Image: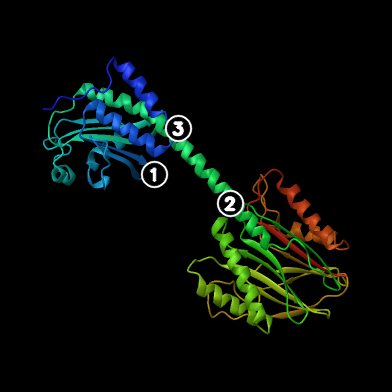
């Protein structure tokens, strides 16, 4: 049996202290793991060593696999005894087998037989009550190579290594989080540039709009789209998902709706074309609800409601709120879907309230929703106000209702008032 190397002279305490200094000299996780593995192999005289960390799905990620000459080992998952690792993780205790070939616990395992594994040490990487992963070393030539003394040293080194690994892992997470936050901030700036900040001027109409993402980015949008004959289209839409996927889909939808309206005669034909393009261009199951109306020089508006919340029409003469209900299904599901269009007359003092479900579905600390009844009451109470003041009243009412509770869903509003 070969003589086992002693890389650092002195007491075990001195060895552990020096190894701790070595492990904590870097915050690069891969570098720390390689250092841990190299020092463990040297300390116990192992032939090979592996570090596997738990991943977010409950599996193991083999982050470092090293040989005695500080060389990396390819395909580490096929080079070890999974049965030994499973026992360590299940019992949260180290395992020493003097000869896996004759050990009743492991001798019938294919990996042990196929790899001709003999002496094995494996211990959990444990930090307080948290298992980070395992360290595994072996010697395939000699049985009885590792002793109880080396198991004790091996476990002590693993305890020191766990601290350094966790520090490096947390640093890696912080760096990645910072990178993602910067990317999300950039995504927000790009997305917000697609949302009209300057409201259009259109004879006889007063507009107000707001866009509040519940997260860094949003699946909601509103838009004002001039059309060739002097009309103006107003759009509000909601991708029924959250986060970056919804934000990307929102950008796609906005572009396709604009392009489709440019090439269509009737409003319903434009939405049907946009729906067909959305279905053709995406394999994602991400439905989009949309409300679109067209303003011309006369008192009538034409609208298409593609599965969206009914836009509210305040009729000043009757002092009542009417709902402009659906004329077709949501976009992005059925490529051949057909859409109807309706017209409604708006007189001076009438107005439209476009909104996404983030308004009625806003939740307070008691898990109560803002609701349509409260929403419509605020609108009715402010029916004589300008568009911007109606919008502000709704926003204030929602904010007062939810208090310190964060928005559950994106909140988008658009008011169009006939002057």
Disc 1 marks which residue?
Answer: 55
Q: Is mark 3 on a helix, strand or loop?
A: helix
Q: Tell whether 405 sits left or right of 23.
A: right
Q: Is residue 266 above or below residue 94?
A: below
Using the rendered image of the protein, determine whether residue 133 is visible from the camera's viewpoint.
no
- Mark 2, residue position: 184
- What is the x, y in percent for residue 192? 67, 58
For marks 2 and 3, the one nearer the N-term is 3
Which residue is rendered at x = 65% and y = 47% of the image?
Answer: 406
Residue hosting label 3: 167
Foreground pick, 342 / 228: 228
Q: Earlier in the sequence, mark 1 or mark 3?
A: 1
Q: Quadrant of residue 255?
A: bottom right
| Residue sitting at the far top | 11
Foreground pick, 360 / 141: 141
Number of numbered discs on residues = 3
Q: Is residue 223 left or right of residue 333?
A: right
Q: Position of residue 5 (x, y in %)?
A: 21, 24
Residue 193 marker: none
Characterize the local packing of mark 2: few (<14), some (14-19) or many (20 or more) Cα atoms within 10 angstroms: some
Residue at x 42% of width, y 45% of height: 56
Instruction: Name the element at disc 2.
Output: helix
Disc 1 and disc 3: Cα gap in Å? Answer: 16 Å
Within 10 Å of disc 1 (Cα), the crowding (few <14, some 14-19, many 20+) is: few
Element type where label 1 sits in the image = loop
Nearest-to-viewer mark from 1 and 3: 3
């Amino acid at each position: 049996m070969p003589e086992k190397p002693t890389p650092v002279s002195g007491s075990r305490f001195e060895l552990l202290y020096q190894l701790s200094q070595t492990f904590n000299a870097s915050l690069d996780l891969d570098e720390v793991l390689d250092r841990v593995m190299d020092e463990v192999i040297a300390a116990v005289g192992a032939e090979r060593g592996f570090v596997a960390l738990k991943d977010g799905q409950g599996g193991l990620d083999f982050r470092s696999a090293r040989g005695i000459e500080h060389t990396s080992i390819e395909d580490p998952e096929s080079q070890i005894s999974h049965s030994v690792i499973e026992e360590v993780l299940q019992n949260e205790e180290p395992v020493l087998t003097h000869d896996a070939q004759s050990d009743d616990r492991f001798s019938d395992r294919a990996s042990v037989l196929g790899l001709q594994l003999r002496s094995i040490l494996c211990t959990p990487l444990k930090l307080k009550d948290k298992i980070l992963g395992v360290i595994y070393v072996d010697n395939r030539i000699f049985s009885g190579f590792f002793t109880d003394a080396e198991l004790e040293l091996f476990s002590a080194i693993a305890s020191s290594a766990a601290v350094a690994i966790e520090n490096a892992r947390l640093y890696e997470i912080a760096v990645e989080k910072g990178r993602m936050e910067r990317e999300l901030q950039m995504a927000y700036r790009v997305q917000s540039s697609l949302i009209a900040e300057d409201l259009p001027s259109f004879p006889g109409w007063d507009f107000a709009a707001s866009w509040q993402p519940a997260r860094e980015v949003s699946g909601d949008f509103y838009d004002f789209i001039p059309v060739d004959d002097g009309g103006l289209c107003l759009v509000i839409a909601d991708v029924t998902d959250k986060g970056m996927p919804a934000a990307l889909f929102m950008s796609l939808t906005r572009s396709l709706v604009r392009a489709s309206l440019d090439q269509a005669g009737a409003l319903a034909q434009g939405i049907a074309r946009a729906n067909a393009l959305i279905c053709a261009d995406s394999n994602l199951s991400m439905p989009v609800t949309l409300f679109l109306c067209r303003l011309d020089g006369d008192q009538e508006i034409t609208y298409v409601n593609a599965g969206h919340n009914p836009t509210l029409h305040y009729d000043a003469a009757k002092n009542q709120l009417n709902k402009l209900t659906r004329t077709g299904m949501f976009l992005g599901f059925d490529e051949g879907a057909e859409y109807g269009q309706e017209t409604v007359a708006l007189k001076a003092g009438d107005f439209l309230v476009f909104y996404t479900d983030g308004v009625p579905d806003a939740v307070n600390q008691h898990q109560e929703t803002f609701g349509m009844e409260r929403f419509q009451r605020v609108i009715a109470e402010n029916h004589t106000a300008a568009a911007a003041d109606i919008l502000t009243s709704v926003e204030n009412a929602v904010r007062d209702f939810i208090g310190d509770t964060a928005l559950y869903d994106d909140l988008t509003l658009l008011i169009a008032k006939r002057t």
